[in-house]
Image (tube, coloured by chain):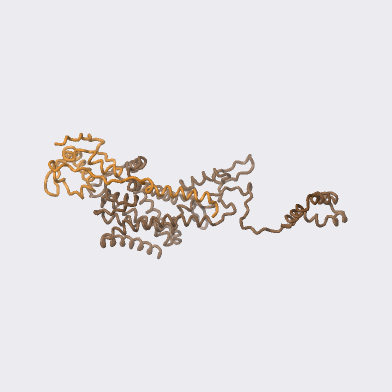
Chain colours: A orange, B brown
């Protein structure tokens, strides 16, 4: 092999960079986020099913925002036929009152920075009854 | 044309394999654990093997392509980057080559003007598409590290937020997320333009082989499935990360509830990794090893000896004169050393102890 020093240095740098996911996690546990659901006494059901809320709540919230701000439409009728007030603070956060224990769990896990809090106040967690 | 169809069908078959394998047969461990590990192993082993194999080829002489004045006399201004005269200049040249594709920027196009007159004109589109494609691809790959690290490094989060500065609401069409990651769209645009270039320009189409089409279709497929998985299907990314972290920490898990679209995307990426060392994509490493770029142009300053040069027997003038000095003097020819001088040198050499004389004689024979 010619230019051994340079070739090996290059390969080591390449491997060091490309195996970043392997060595940066070494010796660290990677707990799966567990968003804390509101107690059964507060609510037993969300406005849509869990799978939909897990993957698409942001689209829903965005639609709500546009409907409320641009169309002045505040009524959301869920799949089960129940009507809800389209409001992050008054509807969503009523049950999911602790941002740190609910929203941030998955958002931090995936480096998502939702712009909800650009306008909305972060709610103070309610005292548990 | 055969190469085009073959590659297109090949990528569609790959999509089909993942669709049937996960969607139909439920082989989640195969597609989520075994194939990814095998693909990444092939990638690393293959890439290192190829580079070592290249490094075994000697490059005895300087063959840089130069595009500027070589360093010579003090009053002639050298072009240090395009005709590198030192290691530092080569490093600068390589950095600019790798990061900005300078040689591609010089791309020319031959065309006809006013009948048979040919001319060369600048052709920047290839460079533009290549820059779009490669930088977007880099950002996309780095962004995906959010799935493989926990906690996510601050610089990664920053990149993610910079890339996602644009907010587009297509929710009323049932697609989209509040934030659009621009790099993914630029990547799709870049790969499409590179693909169109091969399709539209007849001369380029003529020299395109399956090895050119396949990576383009494969990367297009990866882009499309990725964009689909993010904006349309909206796969459960928390579970995807759970799985990715399992792979990165060697504790593989296969969570339920991940859409088959994710598996198609993931399988195509695995194919790209496994295909990498066998393909033209090796220019990732090859760009660093191209002798026309990475050599110092110092042929006039440094003597480069070919390592396998045959040792040529020489008989120079001094030896010739030693052989024929007497005759030359007799014939009245000029000599470098007179007979007396040569004699004095000879005795001076022979005076020391006997074994040493033997040694010098041996040396002379060698």
Q: Residue at x 34, y 58 (%)?
A: B34
Q: Is residue A127 left or right of residue B97?
A: left
Marker count (numbered) = 0
Q: Between B339 and B196, which is closer to the camera in this rendering?
A: B339
Q: Residue at x 71, y 59 (%)?
A: B313
Q: Residue A25: x percent and y percent?
A: 35, 46
Q: Between B10 and B207, which is closer to the camera in this rendering?
A: B10
Q: Residue B225: x percent and y percent?
A: 31, 54
Quadrant of the rendering where the C terminus of chain A is positioned = top left
Quadrant of the rendering where the N terminus of chain A is positioned = bottom right
Answer whether residue B47 is visible to the viewer in this image. Answer: yes
Answer whether residue B195 is visible to the viewer in this image. Answer: no
Q: Between B10 and B33, which is closer to the camera in this rendering?
A: B33
Q: Between A65 and A37, which is closer to the camera in this rendering?
A: A37
Q: Residue A92: x percent and y percent?
A: 18, 41
Q: Is residue A31 left or right of residue B55?
A: left
Q: Residue A4: x percent and y percent?
A: 53, 51
């Amino acid at each position: 092999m010619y230019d051994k020093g340079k070739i090996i240095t290059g390969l080591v740098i390449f491997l060091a960079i490309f195996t970043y996911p392997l060595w940066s996690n070494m010796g660290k546990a990677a707990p799966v986020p567990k968003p804390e659901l509101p107690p059964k006494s507060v609510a037993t059901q969300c406005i849509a099913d869990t799978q939909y809320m897990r993957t698409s709540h942001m689209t829903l919230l965005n639609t709500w925002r546009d409907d409320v701000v641009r169309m002045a439409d505040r009524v959301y009728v869920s799949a089960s036929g129940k009507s809800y007030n389209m409001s992050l603070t008054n509807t969503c956060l009523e049950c999911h009152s602790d941002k740190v224990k609910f929203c941030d769990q998955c958002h931090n896990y995936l480096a998502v920075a939702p712009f909800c809090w650009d306008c909305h106040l972060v709610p103070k967690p309610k005292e548990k009854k | 044309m055969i190469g085009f169809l073959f590659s297109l069908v090949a990528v569609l078959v790959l999509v089909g394999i993942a669709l049937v394998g996960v969607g139909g047969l439920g082989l989640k461990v195969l597609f989520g654990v075994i194939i990814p590990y095998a693909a990444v192993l092939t990638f690393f082993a293959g890439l290192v093997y190829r580079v070592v194999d290249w490094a075994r080829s000697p490059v005895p002489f300087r063959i840089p392509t130069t595009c500027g004045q070589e360093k010579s006399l003090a009053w002639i201004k050298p072009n240090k980057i395009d005709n590198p005269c030192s290691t530092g200049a080569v490093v600068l040249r390589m950095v600019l080559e790798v990061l900005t594709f300078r040689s591609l920027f010089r791309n020319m196009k031959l065309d006809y003007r006013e009948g048979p007159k040919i001319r060369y004109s600048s052709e920047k589109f290839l460079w533009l598409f290549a820059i779009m494609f490669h930088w977007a691809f880099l950002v996309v790959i780095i962004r995906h590290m959010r799935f493989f690290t926990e906690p996510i490094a601050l610089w990664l989060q920053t990149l993610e937020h910079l890339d996602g500065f644009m907010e587009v609401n297509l929710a009323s069409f049932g697609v989209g997320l509040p934030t659009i990651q621009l790099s993914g769209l630029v990547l799709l645009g870049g790969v499409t333009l590179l693909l169109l270039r091969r399709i539209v320009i007849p001369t380029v189409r003529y020299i395109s082989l399956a090895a050119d089409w396949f990576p383009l279709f494969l990367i297009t497929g990866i882009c499309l499935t990725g964009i689909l998985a993010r904006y349309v299907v909206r796969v459960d990314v928390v579970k995807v990360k759970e799985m990715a972290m399992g792979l990165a920490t060697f504790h593989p898990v296969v969570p339920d509830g991940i859409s088959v679209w994710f598996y198609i995307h993931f399988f195509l990426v695995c194919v790209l990794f496994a295909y990498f060392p066998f393909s033209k994509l090796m220019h990732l490493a090859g760009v660093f090893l191209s002798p026309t770029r990475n050599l110092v142009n110092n042929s006039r300053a440094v003597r480069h000896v070919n390592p396998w040069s045959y040792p040529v027997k020489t008989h120079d003038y001094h030896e010739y004169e030693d052989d024929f000095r007497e005759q030359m003097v007799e014939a009245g020819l000029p000599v470098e050393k007179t007979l007396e001088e040569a004699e004095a040198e000879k005795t001076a050499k022979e005076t020391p102890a006997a074994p040493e004389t033997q040694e010098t004689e041996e040396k002379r024979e060698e």
